[in-house]
Image (tube, grey):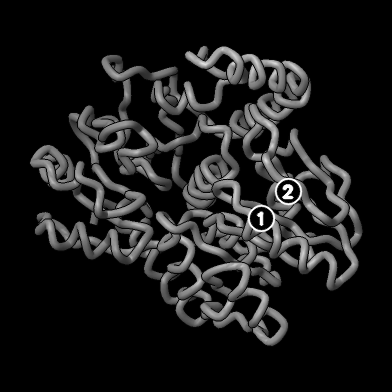
Amino acid sequence: MKIGIITFHRAKNFGALLQCLALYNFLTKNGCDVEIIDYRNPVIEDTYRKFPKLKKNLIKYSGLFLYSLWNYRKLDCRDKNFEKLRLTMKHTKEIRRNDCDGLDFDVFIAGSDQLWNPIITKGLDPMYFLDFVKSGVKSTYAMSMGTVKNEHFKEAVFDKYIEGFDYISMRESDAAEFIKNKKTKNDVVQSLDPTLLLSSSQWDNLLKKDNIKLPEKYVFIYYVKESPELIKMADKLAEKHNIPIVYINVYQKKPVSFKFKSKVYNIVQADPLDFVNCVKNAAYIVTSSFHATAFSCIYKKDVFILPHNVTGSRVTSIADVFGIQNRIYKSFEDFSKRFENDKIEYNEENYITLRDESVNYLNNVCKGK
């Protein structure tokens, strides 16, 4: 069975590449011939430039440019690490919007990740709706839309796009319900993010020797957007346990606008598997990120979650799956009042059910059932 996956595989984003790696490995180990469709979405490509685009505010641009130049070696090292991991997977030739000839697969899978989030792609990208497919099974796996309230989803073209699929699975429950209400011709299911298809031991097999030096015991902080509340949460844990903070600067082209009170290990050149190692080896994790939460659940870590005010449903949904809703906080004040008494106990019953359903869904897609 030949399978082509289209996703944000070129984004220099930990979660984007890790979910791609997970789905690729899961399908490959189940006997499928898998390739990543090397589509270059121009918005995604532009987002991860080493140097910022020229801005009208020349003073601000000059500052960002000089910061990128100062960190160039580290940024270049990071980019090469991403590319090295990407090359462990088979790819098609480079694909552009009007150049899809030669894509001959039995099954096409769009996903996972937020391919249907028009904020990320600056409008709906038809490629991620597989509009180029002339023959073969059209499916999604654990597709995400960001928020279902976006105005783009009210457009007739969106309804037309989703009607062309043979199978649809969504990552979030509200997205699955939303697509179901569109009355598509096929059932819509909720599936786990691909990273959750692999066990902790399977991830351990993918991890390389530590590429970065980590302290023996630390608080790991990872966020979606800069948040003073998260910083204060991490500082409070570090102070209480007298340990440092490990921090990955995801805003590689600009300095952070805050300072930690505690001792900090600021990591710039980490690749996606280094990120997994940071989660795996942490004593405590503070995050607003979906994938930091996902890997915390995989490794059953002591995690404290402050969901993003717009895209937070993605994080709360996975907390629900693992029964750790008590580790969701509304603010630093809420955290301060509760964290010492909020014991974490993972309940995998729902996770096992969802994993079995997700595996069954992929098996059906691959067999065309």
Residue at horizontal 36 percent and vertical 50 percent from the top:
146
Q: Nearer the viewer, residue 270 or 136?
A: 270
**Residue position marked by numbered label 1 in the rendering:** 203
Amino acid residing under circle 1: Trp
Residue at horizontal 62 percent and vertical 35 percent from the top:
251
Question: Percent position (x, y) of residue 265?
Answer: 84, 46
Q: Which quarter of the image is occupied by the C terminus?
A: bottom left
State which quadrant residue 84 falls in. Answer: top right
**Residue position marked by numbered label 2 in the rendering:** 207
Q: Is residue 350 left or right of residue 173?
A: right
Question: Percent position (x, y) of residue 201?
Answer: 69, 62
Residue at horizontal 58 percent and vertical 33 percent from the top:
12
Question: Percent position (x, y) of residue 6?
Answer: 38, 35
Q: Is residue 76 left or right of residue 362?
A: right
Q: Are marks 1 and 2 in contact (CB under 8 Å)?
A: yes
What distance separates the C-alpha of mark 1 from that of mark 2?
6 Å
